[in-house]
Image (cartoon, grey):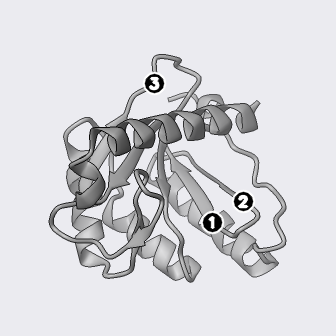
Amino acid sequence: MNKQQCSIEPRQSAMVDTATRKALATLQAEFALTGHAMTWCADDDGLITILVSRWVFAREFDSIEQARAFLRQIGGPMNDITEINRVRAALHADDRPARCWGCFQMRAPAPGWLVCSYKPHNPAHPSLVYLVCPKCAKSQKAMRGARRAIETKARSIAEAAR
């Protein structure tokens, strides 16, 4: 994997303090030892997006320890079959709410959640794993909206990497 493809420069954000940046740098070094390229960026609301070997996990973490624990649960080589199972297992191990990409609401993880993978046609865009709640999973309109939102997210990540 070319590190250039999955490089995101950490953006300065008022919501991300120096201690969090240092902890993310440490986490980045830990993933480098396992052969994974890891980068991160934060938006103005403090949502930290962590990119690990071109797979993006967008979760709101209360602390860097929670981010580290979540990423360790799904760590290891990613492929088409295992990434969905790892994310699903990590979701059920964590009772904190997850963001649904269909309705953008924070909801408690439950057995009906869909874990979807997005593989872009453009190789410069990252592959993404995203979540859809059971309510939105039943609606084709919500599923299309989630797909459009995740395509937009992939495009913005690729533009930030330039």
Q: Which mark is residue 43?
A: 2
Q: Establish if 10 lies above or below 124.
A: below
Q: Are marks 2 and 3 in contact (CB under 8 Å)?
A: no
Q: CA distance from mark 3 to mark 1?
A: 23 Å
Upstream in sequence: badge 3 or badge 1 = 1
Secondary structure type for disc 1: loop
Q: Which mark is residue 47?
A: 1
Which residue has dot 3 on it?
A: 120
Q: Establish if 77 lies above or below 64.
A: above
Q: CA distance from mark 1 to mark 2?
A: 6 Å
Q: Nearer the viewer, residue 68 or 110?
A: 110
Q: Amino acid at mark 2?
A: Asp
Q: Please indicate, yes or no, whether residue 31 appears anywhere in the rendered image.
A: yes
Upstream in sequence: badge 2 or badge 3 = 2
Q: Amino acid at mark 1?
A: Leu
Classify 10 Å Cα crowding around label 2: few (below 14), some (14-19), many (20 and above): some
Classify 10 Å Cα crowding around label 3: few (below 14), some (14-19), many (20 and above): some
Q: Give the image location of residue 6, x and y in percent.
A: 60, 36
